[in-house]
């Protein structure tokens, strides 16, 4: 069930109405049933994978809590706890690897042997990737680690914990919530709040605008060019690559905002997943603003356990590269994703190594790093670097990405930016400029966020007639200018494939 589908627009009001009508003891059960039904709308049999992950991590949490009280020496107690965590990670990651990486691992092995002139008969498994498996697996594993670190008590109520793993607004594409935030909120009986519902509705409308009006419109241009990159070369690919950076942002940011809005109507606040990432002045800052829940997950549960930067500068760089390569692999079982992650890791490491030289140059040239021009230059350079790496994210495989990069570097048709040729790439003139106008709205909203201004709070502070008029016009605008398929089909979110 997609957020941008008619089914969800029927499903969600029913869930909300029943949730606030039902007595306190039944609220969690109702949300759990709704969450399982929400997921089963994709593939009912894969609900057993969520249940398996839930049982393993729930049992691991209880076992960790019991180990803490064992009458044995601390050293042995620590060893038992580590074995429990390893058992939980091994089982959960084994399921994830089977469904997501089995064919990829075999293809890599075959390629290695082929390079040594040895041909292997590698089996191909017909495996359908379960929607959201990477998200809910990481969320469940973070709970195990939090209990191990004594950051949260083991949850005794199985149904409440099952709801934490499967909470439907953020189940299939995040944000990857922490038990310290979501589980504690689920422990409370939420009462209906008109203010929270109003703010949640505004969030959902903003998310629908990002997805339906912007991301799906941009997709028409990007898919046209990348779908026939040999015909649309040079300047077309530059435009499509720049727009793809905005497409993937609007698509994923849109999902996160809709999820946050839906949860807020239910009285639950999810963590912020994006914070104006394209205003970042460095790659390191970009990754502090982009997919915050995943970046912080890798920081807390991989980078820090590896030693972080505590064991020396070069060990810290190695740990950074491991994290980015793992992040690339998390996104998909494809060498292109690993290269994309590796490129961003190299960007970050190069930025850290080159910082003393940059500081010296700024000092010698007497530049003001706080000036608007300096900040804009850094932001543009950061966008270009991140956008360049996204070629591997969007292209159909490694060789296609390398060919597209070559075509971009050797631009032989710069005139297409001025002669109207861009209006023939899936969007006519009106839709192209509507897309550009919508991107300006996004830029303004992100600029306000950077400056600490919450646009929805400004709207809420206006008179009631203005608020409701704004909501009515927003709904009409999304319905009128949104991109719909044949029969008003809803387009998938990009991150569902991860």
Image: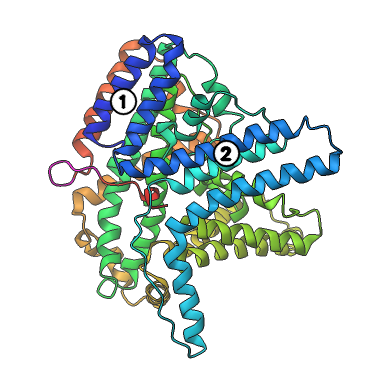
* Colour style of the rendered protein structure: rainbow
Of all residues shown, which one is farthest toward the bottom?
117
Reply yes or no: does residue 319 show up in magenta. no
Q: Position of residue 292 (x, y in %)?
A: 55, 43
Image side of residue 235 versus residue 180, left or right? left
Mark number, residue 12: 1
- Does 93 appear above or below 229? above
Reply yes or no: does residue 486 show up in magenta. yes
Q: Work out whether residue 369 or residue 93 is closer to the camera in this orientation and state it.
A: 93
Rate crowding at label 1 as few (under 14), some (14 to 19) or many (20 or more) other CA atoms within 10 Å.
some
Q: Taking the image as drawn, is residue 150 in sight?
A: no
Which residue is the site of mark 2? 57
- Residue drawn at x 55%, y 40% as measured from the top left: 56
- Does 78 appear above or below 198? below
Q: Position of residue 193 (x, y in %)?
A: 43, 12
Q: Quadrant of the N terminus?
A: top left
- Residue drawn at x 58%, y 23% as measured from the top left: 184
Q: Position of residue 493 (x, y in %)?
A: 34, 46
- Does 420 appear above or below 66? below
Secondary structure mostly taken by the magenta-highlighted segment of the chain: loop
- Residue drawn at x 55%, y 50% as measured from the top left: 91
- Does 410 appear above or below 17? below
Magenta span covers which residues?
485-490
- Residue drawn at x 12%, y 42% as measured from the top left: 487
Whichever of callouts 2 and 1 sits on the residue coming sooner in the sequence is 1
Mark 2 residue element: helix
Q: Taking the image as drawn, is residue 22 in sight?
A: yes
Mark 1 residue element: helix
Q: Work out whether residue 106 or residue 218 is closer to the camera in this orientation and state it.
A: 106
Q: Work out whether residue 67 or residue 483 is closer to the camera in this orientation and state it.
A: 67
């Amino acid at each position: 069930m997609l957020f941008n589908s008619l089914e969800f627009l029927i499903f969600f009001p029913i869930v909300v109405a029943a949730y606030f009508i039902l007595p306190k003891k039944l609220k969690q059960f109702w949300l759990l049933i709704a969450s399982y039904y929400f997921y089963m709308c994709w593939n009912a049999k894969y609900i057993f994978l969520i249940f398996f992950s839930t049982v393993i991590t729930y049992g691991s949490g209880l076992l960790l809590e019991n180990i803490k009280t064992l009458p044995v020496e601390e050293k042995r107690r620590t060893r038992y706890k580590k074995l429990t965590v390893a058992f939980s990670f091994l089982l959960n990651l084994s399921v994830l690897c089977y469904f997501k990486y089995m064919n990829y691992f075999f293809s890599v092995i075959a390629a290695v042997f082929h390079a040594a002139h040895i041909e292997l008969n590698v089996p191909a498994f017909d495996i359908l990737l379960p929607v959201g498996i990477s998200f809910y697996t990481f969320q469940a594993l973070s709970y195990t680690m939090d209990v191990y670190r004594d950051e949260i008590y083991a949850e005794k109520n199985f149904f409440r914990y099952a709801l934490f793993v499967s909470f439907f607004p953020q189940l299939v594409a995040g944000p990857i919530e922490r038990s310290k935030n979501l589980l504690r909120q689920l422990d409370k009986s939420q009462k209906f709040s008109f203010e929270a519902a109003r703010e949640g509705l505004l969030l959902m409308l903003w998310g629908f605008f990002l997805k339906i009006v912007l991301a799906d419109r941009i997709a028409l241009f990007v898919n046209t060019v990348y779908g026939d990159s040999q015909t649309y070369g040079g300047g077309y690919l530059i435009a499509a690559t720049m727009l793809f950076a905005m497409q993937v942002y609007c698509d994923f940011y849109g999902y996160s905002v809709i999820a946050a809005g839906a949860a807020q109507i239910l009285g639950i606040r999810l963590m912020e997943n994006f914070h104006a990432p394209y205003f970042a002045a460095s790659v390191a800052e970009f990754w502090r603003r982009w997919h915050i829940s995943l970046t912080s997950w890798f920081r807390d549960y991989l980078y820090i356990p590896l030693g972080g930067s505590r064991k020396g500068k070069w060990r810290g760089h190695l740990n950074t590269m491991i994290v980015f390569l793992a992040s690339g692999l998390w996104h998909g079982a494809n060498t292109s994703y690993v290269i994309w992650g590796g490129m961003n890791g190299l960007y970050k490491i190069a930025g850290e190594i080159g910082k003393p030289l940059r500081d010296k140059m700024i000092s010698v040239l007497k530049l003001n790093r706080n000036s608007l021009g300096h900040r804009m230059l850094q932001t543009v350079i950061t966008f270009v670097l991140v956008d360049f790496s996204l070629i591997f994210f969007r292209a159909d495989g490694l060789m296609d990405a390398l060919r597209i990069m070559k075509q971009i570097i050797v631009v032989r048709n710069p005139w297409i930016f001025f002669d109207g040729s861009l209006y023939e790439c899936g969007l006519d003139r009106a839709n192209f400029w509507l897309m550009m106008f919508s991107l300006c709205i996004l830029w303004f909203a992100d600029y306000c966020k950077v400056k600490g201004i919450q646009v929805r709070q400004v709207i809420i502070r206006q008179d009631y007639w203005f608020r409701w008029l704004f909501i009515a016009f927003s709904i009409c605008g999304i319905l009128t200018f949104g991109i719909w398929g044949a029969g008003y089909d809803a387009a998938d979110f990009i991150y569902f494939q991860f």
